[in-house]
Amino acid sequence: MKKTLFELVNEVEDEVTFMVFLQQLSKDREGHADEWQNDSIASFLEAAADWGQASIDGLSHYEKPDNPWKRCAQILYMGKIYE
């Protein structure tokens, strides 16, 4: 069964798994643009940066990972859904 983008972001641990996630993030945008909160690259990057800044010390339901590859993937994933 095909993994969801959320499952893939949580499996990122190194450069190889980050690249797999990044490829699937791109495919998700192509196939499910209507599910994205941010429809331009500028708004996507702004949302990702805003969430990254807001979660720099963790959040009540989010523990910041020690792994920088996973953290970068999570920031990019949130660019899809964060408003």
Image (cartoon, helix red, strand yellow):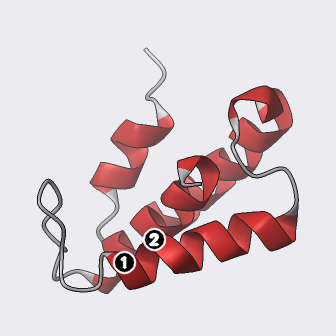
**Which residue is drawn at the image coordinates 67% and 54% (left, top)?**
23
> Do the residues under discs 1 and 2 have CB atoms within 8 angstroms?
yes
**Which residue is drawn at the image coordinates 41% and 63% (left, top)?**
74
Rendering quarter of residue 20? bottom right
Where does residue 36 sit, x and y in percent of width and height?
70, 40
In the displayed structure, 71 sits above or below 35; it is: below
In the displayed structure, 80 sits above or below 14; it is: above
Circle 2: element type: helix
Q: Rounded to the nearest whole Å, what is the CA distance between mark 1 and mark 2?
A: 5 Å
Circle 1: element type: helix
Rendering quarter of residue 62? bottom left
Q: Which mark is residue 54?
A: 1
* Residue toward you, 72 or 56: 56
Q: Residues within 10 Å of mark 1 (few under 14, many from 20)?
A: few
- The amino acid type of the residue labelled 1 equals Ala
Where does residue 34 sit, x and y in percent of width and height?
79, 28
Where does residue 12 sit, x and y in percent of width and height?
34, 61
Is any part of residue 76 visible from this angle? yes
* Residue toward you, 52 or 25: 52
Q: Is residue 17 left or right of residue 59?
A: right
Which residue carries the number 2 mark?
51
**Which residue is drawn at the image coordinates 68% and 75% (left, top)?**
46
In the displayed structure, 80 sits above or below 5; it is: below
* Residue toward you, 28 or 20: 28
**Which residue is drawn at the image coordinates 75% and 52% (left, top)?**
38
* Residue toward you, 8 or 17: 8
